[in-house]
Image (cartoon, coloured by chain):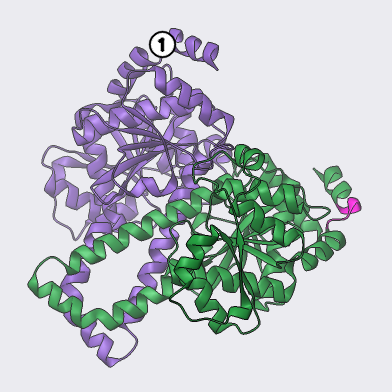
Chain colours: A purple, B green
Amino acid sequence: MPAALHALKDFSDIHINLVGNQALIEAELASKSFDKNRLSITHAEQVVDMDELPSKALRNKRQSSMRLAVNLVKDDVAQACVSAGNTGALMAISKFVLKTIPGIDRPAICTSMPTMKGHVHVLDLGANVGSEGESLAQFAVMGSVLAKAIDGNPKPRIGLLNIGEEEIKGHQRIKDANSLLKLIDINYIGYVEGDDIYKGNVDVVSCDGFDGNIALKASEGVAKMIGFYLKAAFNRNLFTKFIGLLSYPVLKAFKEKVDPRRYNGASFLGLRKIVIKSHGGADAFSFFHAIAEARLEVQKNVPALIAQEVATLLTPQVIEATHNEI
Amino acid sequence: MPAALHALKDFSDIHINLVGNQALIEAELASKSFDKNRLSITHAEQVVDMDELPSKALRNKRQSSMRLAVNLVKDDVAQACVSAGNTGALMAISKFVLKTIPGIDRPAICTSMPTMKGHVHVLDLGANVGSEGESLAQFAVMGSVLAKAIDGNPKPRIGLLNIGEEEIKGHQRIKDANSLLKLIDINYIGYVEGDDIYKGNVDVVSCDGFDGNIALKASEGVAKMIGFYLKAAFNRNLFTKFIGLLSYPVLKAFKEKVDPRRYNGASFLGLRKIVIKSHGGADAFSFFHAIAEARLEVQKNVPALIAQEVATLLTPQVIEATHNEI
């Protein structure tokens, strides 16, 4: 809610429709000042629980805030849906209601992450387990479109996540994707390893949802552990606490660089409309970033760009040619 | 070399056999003082290149330092081999020369990593891609033995690496391993996610080599990126540099906690003898830790303990029972 009001203030070109329990939303809005012409409320009777099975949410929660929000996008009442709810349910509902772009088998979850030189887009992060070569190539093309549209990067470098052991290198499906990506007109730079994600030498990393999820979660875990020990080192005694106080501006500048909240807002790429997933535990600052991401994707019309690029690059002829090569 | 001499000094109970170009080794040793009775040299004509295909190294490099070092272990001249060479080649040669423990299909690469509460053993880290359920269960048992022997942990908590999305949770082989691990007598705590590795709530994480490699490399990448930004923040200007100087003892204490060099020395578990892989770019401090790990595994006789536990836990009856359940 504070994020929505913040976004309304910062972006004069947006309208926000809050979907949920109307009475609760109104009660919370009562004391706030905001432009009433650009905020509306859609009442929802149901809520999708965080641990609800996606298939059940899809079947039984047709009056949930999540379903109604996605419906608003389908009906062109809204141009994008931003939700911090159950990821699996949001994906299942979005796929069912909004459908995928022709040429895309399955949508992918894409987020950006900080690197030593800027940021990188990584997809898929968990929507698809055991993606075949063609899906991985689709992820690569979608990521490339996103990097071009959002970052204004004319020639994003695309990598395929793999491991380094020469002879056993990766699963067959990764090798298939590699063959396919070599044949199409994107800036494919080949295999990248887990540590390459953060080096700043690649702009888009395509990977299976399982692999991407492992990479993302392990990264989050390490970052938290490092933060934990850094804090502990400065909290050890009065002297170190004093040093910590002195270091505050330095540590603050450092934290801003790697603050995961600035990267909140994962795109469900491959859908015909825009759906952005915010972290479940997002604070207002994070959620604002998810709204900003949605706004940017609407401005650039990312789904249309993806549809166009997929139709141009992943033609049946190209896919046929790869099959012959494999 | 400095690591070997350091180890000779610190551990009065070890003998070190340096395998490599004798003339070069002797030249480097000439100016050093050490206990000559506990250091010998085995001359090797060949070297396995870092980018050599494991199968080629196995076939063509029978006089390499790597091969001769593993041979020394096979012939009981040495109780363990420590190498910083080509990982794939070291695994191929070790497997061929030393063989696997009965009941173990494929050896796994296991390393320990820091957590918020201590450390965790993770395996496999890249020797096996697409491991079936039985292999993952074997990794779990081997890791459990290692944690018991090396850490003196009587009941190590064993987790299986997976992702959190309910309905699509993991590959079939992970579900198979889950069923198997529930049936055997180890302290199996269920699925863990990438971030759980670093929380300190699990002592052993079993995973496929592809998944483990992705997790490890992504973690390394993030840690390096964070270090990079931390350094940059303290190097920004004269004032921050001064703060950095003051913070030096704090940052040093912090670094020691997460220093990857302290965790250098990956065990090839599942072989009949002990082989330890050091990081390729290891400095003397790191390599010393790899030697210390080898010494510890010799003292505890880890391969014998694994053989015993595998024979007890992974009986044909148990495996049969799981097949029926799956």
Q: Main secondary structure of the magenta part?
A: helix
Q: Nearer the viewer, residue A131 or A325?
A: A325
Q: Residue at x 81, y 64 (%)?
A: B309
Q: Residue furthest top?
A: A317
Q: Residue furthest left?
A: B238
Three-letter amino acid code at disc 1?
A: Thr
Q: Answer with left or right where residue A289 lies relative to residue B298.
A: left
From what the image shows, is residue B66 above or below residue A237? above
Q: Residue at x 58, y 46 (%)?
A: B88
The answer to whether residue A223 of the structure is visible from this angle is yes
* Quarter placement of the N terminus of chain A: bottom left
Q: Nearer the viewer, residue B298 or A59?
A: B298
Q: Is residue A251 magenta?
A: no
Q: Is residue B315 magenta?
A: yes
Residue B205 occupies quadrant: bottom right
Q: Which residues are magenta?
A: B314-318
Neighbours of disc 1 within 10 Å: few (<14), some (14-19), many (20+): some
Element marked by disc 1: loop
Q: Residue at x 41, y 16 (%)?
A: A102
Residue B222: give x, y in percent of width and height: 37, 56
Q: Which residue is mark 1?
A: A315
Residue B74: give x, y in percent of width and height: 75, 58
Q: Nearer the viewer, residue B62 or B23?
A: B23
Q: Residue at x 26, y 86 (%)?
A: A241
Q: Nearer the viewer, residue A166 or A227?
A: A166
